[in-house]
Amino acid sequence: MREIVFAGSGGQGVLTVGLIISDIAATEGLNVTWVPSYGSAMRGGTANCTVKYCAENYIYNPSQEQPDLLLAMNEPSLHMFLPIVAPGGTVLVGDTVTISDDARQDVTYVHVNCTEIATSLGNPKGANVVMTGAVVKLMGDFTKEAAIAAMNHMFEKKGKSKFNESNAKAFDAGYNAVECLTNTSCVR
């Protein structure tokens, strides 16, 4: 069983990242759940969703337990969800999030400048897609090619295929950003 929590302010696209990962898992033949929580959570800047996927016949509990990975796109989300990340898990943060010196030491922190990357690609609203690529790379459960194909198919179903090329570039940039960061101080 794999569990990921995606969290940020409303409008940062964290629910969409969760949907993309869910679609990738379903396309790969896995059982998957996507449980969103926004509404009142948006007032605190912690709109979020939980995605769980596995090869077993069922997912016994779709609610948040101990995520293997937390994507925190803002400080309130980091503070709210960091305590539940599984020991040895990964915490992926965007450009506006700072990891304090007294943060948990039993998880790996990865920082990706998603807004900067998306803007440099001419796709300023694509920071969440950049982070989708980073999530796929960090989880290691899906190939980049299969993930991009599933993501594009999801957007095609929503009538948004005109963004496939720019989304694929943003995904690829996020995937490659993690590869570049693993040998630097961005990971501790």
Image (spheres, rainbow, N blue to C red):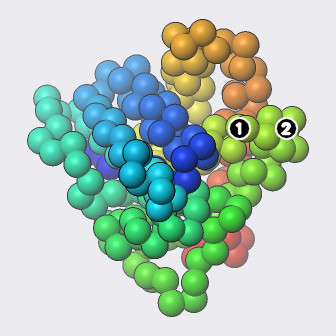
- Give the percent coordinates (x, y) of residue 182: 64, 63
**Residue at image coords 48%, 56%:** 43
Task: Look at the image and tell me in which quarter the C terminus lies.
Answer: bottom right
Q: Is residue 30 shown left or right of residue 170? A: left
Figure check: 30 above or below 120: above
Rendered image quadrant of residue 56: top left
Q: Disc 1, disc 2: CB below 8 Å?
A: yes
Looking at the image, can residue 55 be seen? yes
- Position of 90 relative to 52 (above/below): below
Front residue of 107 and 60: 60
Residue 172: where, in percent of width, then height?
70, 36
- Please state if 138 lies on the left or on the right of 65 as rendered: right
Instruction: Residue 87: give x, y in percent of width and height.
Output: 33, 72
In the image, which disc is placed on residue 126?
Answer: 1
User: What's the residue type where badge 1 is placed?
Assistant: Gly
| 1 vs 2, front mark | 1
Residue assigned mark 2? 121
Q: Indicate the position of residue 130 as horizontal and vertical percent values.
A: 67, 42
Image height of 90 relative to 24, above or below: below
Callout 2: helix, strand or loop?
A: loop
The quadrant holding residue 145 is top right
Disc with the residue nearer the chain's start (1 vs 2) = 2
Left or right: 178, with 4 as reference point:
right
Q: CA distance from mark 1 to mark 2?
A: 9 Å
Q: Quadrant of the N terminus?
A: top left
**Which label belongs to residue 47?**
none
Q: Is residue 185 shown above or below 53?
A: below
Count the marks.
Answer: 2
Q: Amino acid at mark 2?
A: Leu
Task: Classify 10 Å Cα crowding around label 1: few (below 14), some (14-19), many (20 and above).
Answer: many
